[in-house]
Amino acid sequence: MEDIKYILSGLLVAPLLPLMAVQGKRIRASVPKLPSAKGSSGYIGDGKGQALRLITLGESTIAGIGVETHAEGFSGTLARALADQLGKPVAWKVYAESGYTAERVTEKLVPQIAENDIDLIVIGLGGNDAFHLNSPWRWRRSIRELIAALRQRFSETPVVFTNMPPIKRFPAFTPLIKRVVGSHVELLGRSLHHVTEPMPNVFYYARVITLEDWRDRLGVSAPPADYFSDGVHPSALTYQVWARDVAGYIRRLGIL
């Protein structure tokens, strides 16, 4: 079904691609180029027992674009939330690069993983594959290859894919790009669900991210700009709300 939708939407979008290219060029020129977060590993928690060994893997959101350190970004917050839930320390490490697709992560980042024993792998991808308008079948192939590469090293380790990015809410994007790329990332999310659902110990958090939901979780009303550092990437506020939400999902899975 996703393949048919991709083909049909492609026919509708094709005449708009030159306009999207112009708009995309303007967006790239206007959005500041932020560096990845510093401090790609850490140890948190003072509970008893052996530390949970966590790695996070993926694109710019996992790389912490938009915050100064990973401790205040997704990975550090996720580790802190898991340590609180489990009552034991968490040793965490980030393997991520801005601009990477799923295929690129498999080729470049998986070989860099230095750890031999890991208790949990959390992956954040989808934005760059959506921006490239990669087909659902190419995306599915890339995801299967990524999981296979991880399974060669970590045959039993739980793998959790985070929610897809809320591209339709990115303030820096034009209405046209929000609609086209935002719809495409949702299509890739459905494909990701179909790939991971039958796989043992592989999970996808399919909950759609909305700013309204995050406002409810915070208990305060904040303008959309407060949820983004540059109009595209999360702010520290967003990383922390998102990471705690993913930690809750992992707790409900009962895999740790």
Image (cartoon, grey):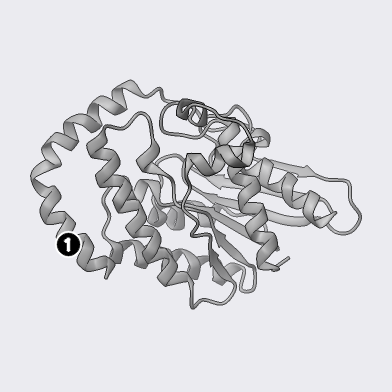
> Hey, which quadrant is residue 251 in on the image?
bottom right
Q: Residue at x 44, y 46 (%)?
A: 165
Q: Residue at x 78, y 54 (%)?
A: 85
Q: Position of residue 211 (x, y in %)?
A: 49, 39
Identify the residue at the far left of this view: 15
Q: Would you place residue 219 above or below residue 91 in this image?
A: above
State the quadrant of the C terminus: bottom right
Which residue bears the numbered disc 1? 7
Q: Nearer the viewer, residue 38 or 183?
A: 183
78 displayed left or right of 182? right
Mark 1, residues whose alpha carbon is within 10 Å: few (<14), some, or many (≥20)? few
208 displayed left or right of 45? left
Q: Position of residue 236 (x, y in %)?
A: 59, 31
Q: Residue at x 50, y 56 (%)?
A: 207
Q: Position of residue 119 (x, y in %)?
A: 70, 63
Q: Position of residue 245 (x, y in %)?
A: 62, 49
Q: Would you place residue 210 above or below residue 8 in this image?
A: above
User: Which type of secondary structure does the marked residue at label 1 adopt?
Assistant: helix
Query: So how many labels did they put on this image?
Result: 1
Identify the residue at the far right of this view: 48
Name the residue type under label 1: Ile
Residue 146 in sight: yes
Q: Nearer the viewer, residue 93 or 16?
A: 16
Q: Residue at x 29, y 27 (%)?
A: 27
Residue 118 in sight: no
Q: Nearer the viewer, residue 227 or 159?
A: 227
153 displayed left or right of 19? right
62 displayed left or right of 117? left
State the quadrant of the N terminus: bottom left
